[in-house]
Image: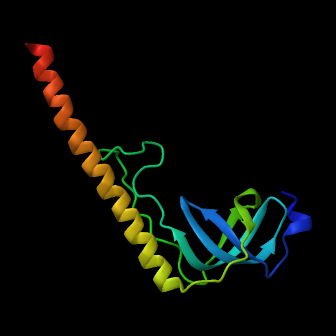
Amino acid sequence: MNVERNMEIGRIVKAGHKTGEYIGEIAEIDGKRTLVQILAVLQHPTQGDLHRPYDPDAPIFHERRASAYREKVWVPSTAVQPYDGAIPSYEETRRTALAAEMERMARLKRWSERSLELLEGLRKEYES
């Protein structure tokens, strides 16, 4: 995407930042990076160590909060794309994104538990 041609200060965009995804307004562009002022949360940031995904025993298990309303964050210009829809309420989108991330983790937990049950059955079969 040609940032110079398609992006300008004041443009509403969708931007990825530190494992989260947001709707925001471009505040500044320096070529490789774009300063985005956060207006809504589309995807809540992932918890834990990004270098050791899904490892509950990672030495540093990070808590990642969603960027705050009107917080300005620098993102790579390649992680910014135009957004043409309505801008929903920050508070509502943050709640919705958090609930979606919690449901995703609950599903992963259920998948893990079911997998362990099946593997336990296989272990018993393999040992007999």
Q: Residue at x 56, y 60 (%)?
A: 18
Q: In x, y percent, where is residue 67?
A: 53, 74
* Quarter-of-image position of residue 125: top left
* Quarter-of-image position of residue 37: bottom right
Say whether residue 112 is left or right of residue 29. left
Q: Residue at x 30, y 47 (%)?
A: 56
Quadrant into which the N terminus falls: bottom right
Outermost residue toward the right?
A: 5
Q: Residue at x 50, y 78 (%)?
A: 93
Q: In x, y percent, where is residue 98?
A: 41, 70
Q: In x, y percent, where is residue 31?
A: 85, 62
Say whether residue 107 is left or right of residue 73. left
Please name whichever residue, 16 or 123, is drawn nearer the observer in this view of the structure: 123
Vertical placement of residue 91 versus 84, above or below: below
Please name whichever residue, 79 or 103, is drawn nearer the observer in this view of the structure: 103
Q: In x, y percent, where is residue 68?
A: 53, 79
Vertical placement of residue 28 versus 120, above or below: below
